[in-house]
Amino acid sequence: MGAGGERDAIGLSVATGRYSDLRPAPMSRRTLSVVLAVALIALAIPAAAYAVITTLSNPSDTNATASCPGTTETPCTVVSRTTAMQVKVGNTATPFKVTTAGRIVGWQITLSSPTAAQTKYFDANEGGTSQAAISVVHQVKGLDYKLEYESPVIHLQPYFGQTADFPLTTSVAVKPGDVIALTVPTWVPALELQAGRKAAWRASRNKTQCTSVGVETAQTVPGSVLQYYCIYRTALVDYKAIEISTP
Protein backbone atom coordinates (compact mmCIF):
# COMPACT_ATOMS: atom_id res chain seq x y z
CA MET A 1 0.00 0.00 0.00
CA GLY A 2 2.96 2.29 0.35
CA ALA A 3 6.07 2.95 2.37
CA GLY A 4 5.95 3.56 6.07
CA GLY A 5 4.01 2.04 8.93
CA GLU A 6 1.54 4.92 9.16
CA ARG A 7 0.51 4.56 5.51
CA ASP A 8 0.34 0.79 5.82
CA ALA A 9 -2.04 1.08 8.78
CA ILE A 10 -4.38 3.20 6.71
CA GLY A 11 -4.20 0.70 3.87
CA LEU A 12 -5.21 -2.09 6.21
CA SER A 13 -8.08 -0.14 7.68
CA VAL A 14 -10.06 0.55 4.57
CA ALA A 15 -10.97 -0.90 1.20
CA THR A 16 -8.85 -0.01 -1.80
CA GLY A 17 -10.19 0.35 -5.33
CA ARG A 18 -8.51 0.27 -8.69
CA TYR A 19 -6.36 3.12 -9.88
CA SER A 20 -7.51 5.41 -12.65
CA ASP A 21 -5.56 8.25 -14.24
CA LEU A 22 -8.64 10.47 -14.04
CA ARG A 23 -8.35 13.32 -11.58
CA PRO A 24 -11.15 14.65 -9.37
CA ALA A 25 -13.04 17.74 -10.43
CA PRO A 26 -12.80 20.69 -8.04
CA MET A 27 -15.12 20.14 -5.09
CA SER A 28 -18.03 22.55 -4.95
CA ARG A 29 -18.68 24.16 -1.56
CA ARG A 30 -22.30 24.46 -0.47
CA THR A 31 -23.26 26.94 2.20
CA LEU A 32 -24.57 25.93 5.61
CA SER A 33 -27.06 28.79 5.60
CA VAL A 34 -29.96 26.57 4.58
CA VAL A 35 -29.17 24.11 7.36
CA LEU A 36 -28.94 26.86 9.94
CA ALA A 37 -32.03 28.69 8.76
CA VAL A 38 -34.12 25.53 8.94
CA ALA A 39 -32.70 24.71 12.35
CA LEU A 40 -33.31 28.15 13.84
CA ILE A 41 -36.90 28.18 12.61
CA ALA A 42 -37.50 24.66 13.89
CA LEU A 43 -36.07 25.46 17.30
CA ALA A 44 -37.80 28.85 17.45
CA ILE A 45 -34.84 30.44 19.24
CA PRO A 46 -35.46 34.12 19.99
CA ALA A 47 -32.70 36.56 19.15
CA ALA A 48 -32.34 37.55 22.80
CA ALA A 49 -31.48 33.96 23.76
CA TYR A 50 -27.95 34.30 22.34
CA ALA A 51 -27.59 30.71 21.17
CA VAL A 52 -24.14 29.94 19.80
CA ILE A 53 -23.69 28.07 16.52
CA THR A 54 -20.68 25.74 16.56
CA THR A 55 -19.28 23.61 13.76
CA LEU A 56 -17.56 20.48 15.03
CA SER A 57 -14.92 19.66 12.45
CA ASN A 58 -11.31 18.78 11.77
CA PRO A 59 -8.70 21.55 11.86
CA SER A 60 -7.22 22.21 8.42
CA ASP A 61 -4.26 20.13 7.29
CA THR A 62 -2.63 21.60 4.18
CA ASN A 63 -0.78 18.38 3.43
CA ALA A 64 -3.89 16.19 3.27
CA THR A 65 -5.23 15.24 -0.15
CA ALA A 66 -8.50 13.72 -1.36
CA SER A 67 -8.22 9.94 -1.52
CA CYS A 68 -9.98 9.20 -4.80
CA PRO A 69 -9.46 8.52 -7.63
CA GLY A 70 -5.92 8.29 -6.29
CA THR A 71 -2.64 7.41 -7.99
CA THR A 72 -0.51 4.32 -8.47
CA GLU A 73 1.41 5.28 -5.32
CA THR A 74 -1.69 6.20 -3.30
CA PRO A 75 -4.68 4.12 -4.46
CA CYS A 76 -8.27 5.24 -4.03
CA THR A 77 -9.07 4.53 -0.38
CA VAL A 78 -12.41 4.73 1.43
CA VAL A 79 -14.01 4.33 4.84
CA SER A 80 -15.89 1.04 4.82
CA ARG A 81 -18.42 -0.79 7.03
CA THR A 82 -17.68 0.92 10.32
CA THR A 83 -18.36 3.94 12.51
CA ALA A 84 -15.50 6.42 12.39
CA MET A 85 -14.48 9.20 14.74
CA GLN A 86 -11.56 11.57 14.27
CA VAL A 87 -9.57 11.63 17.50
CA LYS A 88 -6.55 13.75 16.65
CA VAL A 89 -5.48 16.40 14.13
CA GLY A 90 -2.14 18.03 14.82
CA ASN A 91 -2.21 19.35 18.38
CA THR A 92 -6.02 19.19 18.54
CA ALA A 93 -7.38 16.18 20.39
CA THR A 94 -10.99 14.95 20.10
CA PRO A 95 -12.17 17.64 17.64
CA PHE A 96 -15.66 16.08 17.56
CA LYS A 97 -16.24 16.03 21.32
CA VAL A 98 -19.15 18.23 22.41
CA THR A 99 -18.16 20.81 25.04
CA THR A 100 -21.43 22.70 25.46
CA ALA A 101 -25.00 21.41 25.82
CA GLY A 102 -27.08 22.03 22.71
CA ARG A 103 -28.68 20.38 19.71
CA ILE A 104 -27.17 18.97 16.52
CA VAL A 105 -29.17 20.44 13.64
CA GLY A 106 -27.32 19.15 10.59
CA TRP A 107 -24.17 17.62 9.20
CA GLN A 108 -21.83 17.96 6.28
CA ILE A 109 -19.56 15.62 4.36
CA THR A 110 -16.91 16.21 1.71
CA LEU A 111 -16.60 13.42 -0.84
CA SER A 112 -13.83 12.79 -3.32
CA SER A 113 -14.39 11.52 -6.87
CA PRO A 114 -13.94 7.79 -7.42
CA THR A 115 -14.11 6.70 -11.05
CA ALA A 116 -17.02 4.70 -12.40
CA ALA A 117 -14.88 1.53 -12.22
CA GLN A 118 -13.89 2.23 -8.63
CA THR A 119 -17.50 2.94 -7.66
CA LYS A 120 -18.62 -0.34 -9.24
CA TYR A 121 -15.88 -2.20 -7.35
CA PHE A 122 -16.83 -0.75 -3.96
CA ASP A 123 -20.55 -1.25 -4.56
CA ALA A 124 -19.88 -4.93 -5.27
CA ASN A 125 -17.44 -5.53 -2.42
CA GLU A 126 -18.52 -3.24 0.41
CA GLY A 127 -22.18 -4.05 0.89
CA GLY A 128 -23.85 -1.78 -1.64
CA THR A 129 -23.94 1.84 -2.74
CA SER A 130 -22.21 4.62 -0.82
CA GLN A 131 -24.16 5.52 2.34
CA ALA A 132 -23.53 7.25 5.66
CA ALA A 133 -25.20 8.83 8.68
CA ILE A 134 -24.13 11.03 11.56
CA SER A 135 -24.06 9.48 15.02
CA VAL A 136 -23.74 10.58 18.63
CA VAL A 137 -21.74 8.27 20.89
CA HIS A 138 -20.65 8.61 24.50
CA GLN A 139 -17.65 7.06 26.20
CA VAL A 140 -18.56 4.38 28.74
CA LYS A 141 -15.04 3.43 29.75
CA GLY A 142 -11.71 3.22 28.01
CA LEU A 143 -12.35 2.68 24.29
CA ASP A 144 -15.97 1.54 24.79
CA TYR A 145 -18.65 3.88 23.43
CA LYS A 146 -22.43 3.74 23.65
CA LEU A 147 -24.58 4.75 20.67
CA GLU A 148 -26.93 7.54 21.72
CA TYR A 149 -28.32 8.55 18.31
CA GLU A 150 -28.02 7.85 14.59
CA SER A 151 -29.49 10.07 11.87
CA PRO A 152 -31.29 8.70 8.81
CA VAL A 153 -28.85 7.09 6.37
CA ILE A 154 -28.14 9.14 3.24
CA HIS A 155 -27.33 7.72 -0.22
CA LEU A 156 -24.20 9.68 -1.17
CA GLN A 157 -23.29 8.74 -4.72
CA PRO A 158 -25.08 11.79 -6.22
CA TYR A 159 -22.76 14.00 -4.16
CA PHE A 160 -19.38 12.57 -5.22
CA GLY A 161 -16.89 15.37 -5.85
CA GLN A 162 -18.86 17.79 -3.68
CA THR A 163 -19.38 19.00 -0.14
CA ALA A 164 -22.98 18.22 0.78
CA ASP A 165 -25.07 19.48 3.72
CA PHE A 166 -27.90 17.55 5.37
CA PRO A 167 -30.22 19.29 7.86
CA LEU A 168 -31.82 17.01 10.42
CA THR A 169 -35.60 16.95 10.26
CA THR A 170 -35.58 16.66 14.05
CA SER A 171 -32.60 18.09 15.91
CA VAL A 172 -30.93 15.92 18.54
CA ALA A 173 -29.87 16.99 22.03
CA VAL A 174 -26.20 16.59 22.94
CA LYS A 175 -24.30 17.15 26.16
CA PRO A 176 -20.65 17.74 27.07
CA GLY A 177 -18.66 14.57 26.53
CA ASP A 178 -20.74 13.29 23.62
CA VAL A 179 -18.76 12.59 20.46
CA ILE A 180 -20.02 13.05 16.91
CA ALA A 181 -19.07 10.14 14.65
CA LEU A 182 -19.71 9.09 11.05
CA THR A 183 -21.51 5.77 10.60
CA VAL A 184 -20.81 4.02 7.29
CA PRO A 185 -22.81 0.82 6.72
CA THR A 186 -21.29 0.39 3.26
CA TRP A 187 -18.55 2.76 2.06
CA VAL A 188 -17.81 6.45 1.54
CA PRO A 189 -14.94 8.25 -0.27
CA ALA A 190 -14.56 10.72 2.62
CA LEU A 191 -10.90 10.28 3.49
CA GLU A 192 -8.06 12.74 3.09
CA LEU A 193 -4.71 10.96 3.02
CA GLN A 194 -1.11 12.01 3.66
CA ALA A 195 -2.10 14.18 6.59
CA GLY A 196 0.36 14.91 9.39
CA ARG A 197 1.62 12.07 11.57
CA LYS A 198 -0.46 13.42 14.45
CA ALA A 199 -3.69 12.90 12.49
CA ALA A 200 -5.65 9.82 13.58
CA TRP A 201 -9.13 8.35 13.55
CA ARG A 202 -10.69 5.37 15.30
CA ALA A 203 -13.15 2.78 14.04
CA SER A 204 -15.77 0.75 15.91
CA ARG A 205 -13.70 -2.40 15.59
CA ASN A 206 -12.15 -4.53 18.32
CA LYS A 207 -8.48 -5.50 18.22
CA THR A 208 -9.15 -8.61 16.12
CA GLN A 209 -10.94 -6.62 13.40
CA CYS A 210 -8.48 -3.88 12.43
CA THR A 211 -7.84 -5.44 9.02
CA SER A 212 -11.33 -6.94 8.59
CA VAL A 213 -12.72 -4.39 6.14
CA GLY A 214 -15.12 -6.98 4.71
CA VAL A 215 -16.84 -7.45 8.08
CA GLU A 216 -19.71 -5.14 9.04
CA THR A 217 -18.71 -3.30 12.24
CA ALA A 218 -20.78 -0.10 11.96
CA GLN A 219 -22.44 0.79 15.27
CA THR A 220 -26.14 1.01 14.40
CA VAL A 221 -28.09 -0.50 17.32
CA PRO A 222 -29.37 2.23 19.72
CA GLY A 223 -27.92 1.76 23.19
CA SER A 224 -25.27 -0.68 22.00
CA VAL A 225 -21.72 -0.44 23.33
CA LEU A 226 -18.79 -1.14 21.00
CA GLN A 227 -15.05 -0.88 21.33
CA TYR A 228 -13.20 1.65 19.17
CA TYR A 229 -9.88 -0.15 19.43
CA CYS A 230 -8.54 0.28 15.90
CA ILE A 231 -6.70 3.52 15.19
CA TYR A 232 -5.54 4.64 11.74
CA ARG A 233 -3.03 7.43 11.28
CA THR A 234 -2.11 10.12 8.75
CA ALA A 235 -5.69 10.43 7.50
CA LEU A 236 -8.74 12.64 8.06
CA VAL A 237 -12.38 11.59 7.88
CA ASP A 238 -13.94 14.61 6.19
CA TYR A 239 -17.24 15.36 7.94
CA LYS A 240 -18.70 18.11 10.13
CA ALA A 241 -21.64 18.59 12.50
CA ILE A 242 -23.50 21.80 13.28
CA GLU A 243 -24.56 22.43 16.88
CA ILE A 244 -26.76 25.20 18.29
CA SER A 245 -26.09 25.66 21.99
CA THR A 246 -28.85 25.61 24.58
CA PRO A 247 -29.37 29.26 25.66
Image (cartoon, rainbow, N blue to C red):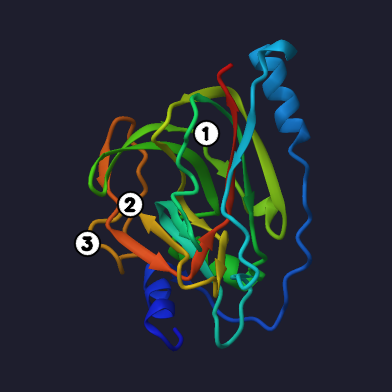
Looking at the picture, which amino acid does disc 3 mark?
Lys
User: Crowding near pointer 1: few (<14 within 10 Å), some, many (20+)?
Assistant: few
Compared across the picture, whether 107 is left or right of 90 comes to right
Label 2 sits on residue: 204
Name the one closer to the observer, 161 or 142: 142
Location of residue 165 in the rendering, given as x and y in whole percent from the top left corner:
68, 41
Which quadrant is home to the N terminus? bottom left
For the residues carrying marks 3 and 1, which lies nearer the camera in this image? 3
Compared across the picture, whether 92 is left or right of 81 comes to right
**Secondary structure beneath label 3:** loop
Location of residue 194 in the rendering, given as x and y in whole percent from the top left corner:
54, 75
**Pointer 2 and pointer 3: residues touching (CB < 8 Å)?**
no
**Secondary structure beneath label 1:** loop
Looking at the picture, which amino acid does disc 2 mark?
Ser
Location of residue 12 in the rendering, given as x and y in whole percent from the top left corner:
37, 73
Residue in view at x 44 percent, y 61 percent: 126
Label 1 sits on residue: 152
User: Crowding near pointer 2: few (<14 within 10 Å), some, many (20+)?
Assistant: many
Q: CA distance from mark 2 to mark 1?
A: 19 Å
Looking at the picture, which amino acid does disc 1 mark?
Pro
Q: CA distance from mark 3 to mark 1?
A: 28 Å
